[in-house]
Image (cartoon, rainbow, N blue to C red):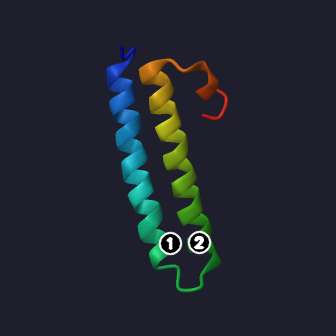
Amino acid sequence: MISEPMTLATDYLLAVVTGVAGVLILRVTEGQNARRCWGVAFLALALGAALGGTYHGFAIEALWKPT
């Protein structure tokens, strides 16, 4: 059973948006280190949002610390 459906949905939406942004930024780095860092940061945010959504939706305690 999903414990917090709206939080799960918004976290997953945030994960998709930031994941796409991270990939798009990494595709156009043109050798610029700052762009590479921002791309990786957005991908890390996507991972954290996905883990957070999974925790909030399914209350898996092992996921709380990584998020």
Residue at 67% in and 28% down: 65
Disc 2 residue type (three-letter): Arg
Mark 1 packing: few (<14 Cα in 10 Å), some, or many (20+)? many
Residue 58 in which image quadrant: top left
In this rendered view, identify the residue nearer to me: 32 or 9.
9
Q: Is residue 42 above or below residue 62?
A: below
Could you say where residue 42 lies in the image, as x and y percent from the top left? 52, 56
Residue 33 vs residue 50: left or right?
right
Q: Secondary structure under badge 2?
A: helix
Q: Secondary structure under badge 1?
A: helix
Q: Is residue 49 above or below residue 21?
A: above
Could you say where residue 10 lies in the image, as x and y percent from the top left? 35, 34
In this rendered view, identify the residue nearer to me: 25 or 59.
59
Disc 1 residue type (three-letter): Leu
Residue at 34% in and 42% down: 13
Residue at 41% in and 35% down: 11
Residue 56 vs residue 35: left or right?
left
Mark 2 packing: few (<14 Cα in 10 Å), some, or many (20+)? some
Of the numbered discs 1 and 2, the one sitting upstream in the chain is: 1
On-image quarter of the N terminus: top left
Can you identify the residue that label 1 sits on? 26
Can you identify the residue that label 2 sits on? 36
Residue 21 in which image quadrant: bottom left
